Amino acid sequence: MQPQQDAAEDVVIVGAGLAGVGVALGLHRKGVRSMVLESSPALRTSGFAFMTWTNAFRALDALGVGDKMRSHHLQVQGGPHEARCVQRNVLLQALEEELPAGTIRYSSRIVSIDDDKEKEGGGDAKILHLADGSTLRAKVLIGCDGINSVVAKWLGLAKPLDSGRRATRGHAKSNPSFPDGTEDADPSPAEMKQFVLAKLRSIKAPAEVLEAVERSEMNDVLVAPLRYRPPLSLLFGSISKGNVCVAGDALHPTTPDLAQGACIALEDAVVLARCLGDAMAGDGDGTETVEEALRRYAGIRRWRSAQVIAASYMVGRVQQSEHAVVRFARDRVLSGVLAKGLLMMPDYDCGTL
């Protein structure tokens, strides 16, 4: 069977992660149809959990799924912010369930992007070349394709940098009582489990904690480098060009030290859907073009993204520094001075659709 050639879509979103599905849902709420291209054969419900702060719940409320997530996840007690540890798969499925059937096209990996030069009046339309040899014509292209984004590369954004640090993530089922603390671990899954168990036994950890580690499936543990996009590249680079833009990790990969990566991806979804939806569905004043709407989105998200990336990187470096002077300043001075300012990050309001 010959691969399909030059099917046309008004709005194509690359990547069915939180940002991509969130943008699609926001556009759907605005009355704008979109197609989401996902390289996996099904919704990628793997992954772990993350802190979802006030800013993320404001975005989820705008998308119409905030209360659904609140009903499944307990609020962290203490402090003025709404904070819940949310399972990635539960959130992604909640967003996907609100989309019209057929919105997400699976097993569709984009490999390259060309300008549509052959069709008269093509304007800023793009030809997307997929791994199966088929092509797709997109009048508007939104890259939500993660840290190794093909769309971000096409826009010319700087490559993400390695922070020099690694993160180990995983699940464990247990009673909800854990001691606080962090510890390095060996990247080998079997050795990692024994390392953790030995450390826990040495501090006489409760039996239920040891049992949780023993029951852990080590194939669910992921060790990954922490990368980030240089903030200055967002301030001076191209977040949008013509009818193309990026959102989520394709825009602002960041270290996890402020627990804001997923939160600001949801902010992106609301802001982008509002700007683009107003231009395409006629909810604005009727004078803004799609290109102008994407530039407006880029202007709103440029500084916010750079701010979160820079602050998160700084916090991670200071937290893990072994330098005596930095440790003294961190423990005696900076912790109190910076805490209030850093807690302003999750108080951001992206607005409504």
Image: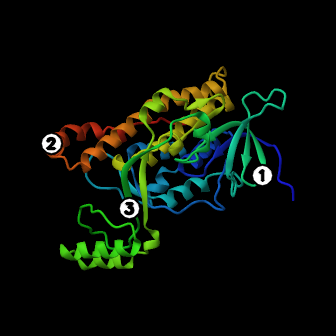
Residue drawn at 30 percent across, 41 percent down:
314
Of pointers 3 and 2, the one earlier in the residue sequence:
3
Which mark is on residue 325?
2
Of pointers 2 and 1, the one earlier in the residue sequence:
1
Q: Name the side, left or right, on which 243 lies relative to 170.
A: right
* Residue linked to disc 1: 133
Among the 4 quarters of the image, the one containing residue 93: bottom right
Q: Position of residue 302 (x, y in %)?
A: 47, 31
What is the CA distance from the residue labelled 3 to the residue labelled 2?
Answer: 28 Å
Residue drawn at 72 percent across, 49 percent down:
130
Among the 4 quarters of the image, the one containing residue 349: top left
* Residue linked to disc 3: 168
Q: Position of residue 322 (x, y in %)?
A: 20, 50
238 or 177: which is nearer to us? 238
Q: Tell me the amino acid under the disc marked 2.
A: Val
Quarter occupied by the C terminus = top right
Q: Residue 245: in sight, yes or no?
A: yes
Q: Is residue 236 above or below residue 213?
A: above
Q: Secondary structure at mark 1?
A: loop
Among the 4 quarters of the image, the one containing residue 247: top right
Of pointers 1 and 3, the one earlier in the residue sequence:
1
104 or 170: which is nearer to us? 170
185 or 20: which is nearer to us? 185
Q: Is residue 194 above or below residue 170?
A: below
Q: Position of residue 282 (x, y in %)?
A: 67, 28
Residue drawn at 84 percent across, 31 percent down:
119
Seen as rendered, the residue at the extreme right is: 1
